[in-house]
Image: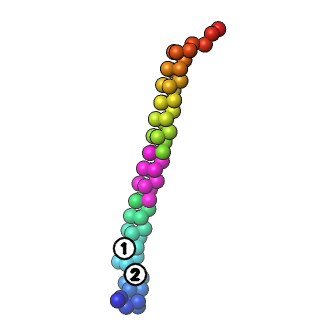
Amino acid sequence: MFKQEALLEYLSSPEGINKIIVGIILVGAINAIFITYSVRSTYGAAKKEREQLKIQQDKIDKLSPKKE
């Protein structure tokens, strides 16, 4: 196992702090990519569903036109 004192000393050094910051940035970037993918897939599914409903409504309107 690691010695806690040596690990804390390393993480307190400028090199260790830089690694911590890079790790936080990487986690944030991965999180942002995941959120973007989730939003796009959800929005894309909703958009496709709206288009299909519009096509379906157009077909219904063709079969039974409204009387004026």
**Discs 2, 1 touching: Cβ within 8 Å:** yes
Q: The disc labelled 2 sits on which kind of residue?
A: Leu
Quarter of the image containing the N terminus? bottom left
First in sequence, mark 2 or 1: give its number. 2
Q: Residue furthest right?
A: 68
C-alpha gap between disc 2 and disc 1: 8 Å
Residue for point 37% across, 91% down: 3
Q: Which residues are magenta?
A: 31-41
SS assignment at label 2: helix
Q: The disc labelled 1 sits on which kind of residue?
A: Lys
Whether 63 is drawn above or below 28: the answer is above
Residue at mark 1 = 19
Residue 54 appears left or right of 9: right
Residue at mark 2 = 11
Q: Is residue 50 magenta?
A: no
Residue 67, quarter of picture: top right
Nearest the eye: 2 or 16:
2
Residue 25, quarter of picture: bottom left
Q: What x and y, as percent, mark residue 65?
A: 57, 13
Q: What x and y, as percent, mark residue 12?
A: 42, 82
**Crowd around label 1: few <14 · some 14–19 · many ≥20 (10 Å):** few
Q: What x and y, as percent, mark residue 21?
A: 41, 70
SS assignment at label 1: helix
Q: What x and y, as percent, mark residue 19?
A: 36, 73
Q: Please say whether residue 9 is visible from this viewpoint.
A: no
Q: Residue furthest front?
A: 63
Q: Residue furthest top?
A: 68
Residue for point 40% across, 73% down: 20
Q: Please say whether residue 66 is visible from this viewpoint.
A: yes
Whether 46 is drawn above or below 54: the answer is below
Quarter of the image containing the C terminus? top right
**Crowd around label 2: few <14 · some 14–19 · many ≥20 (10 Å):** some
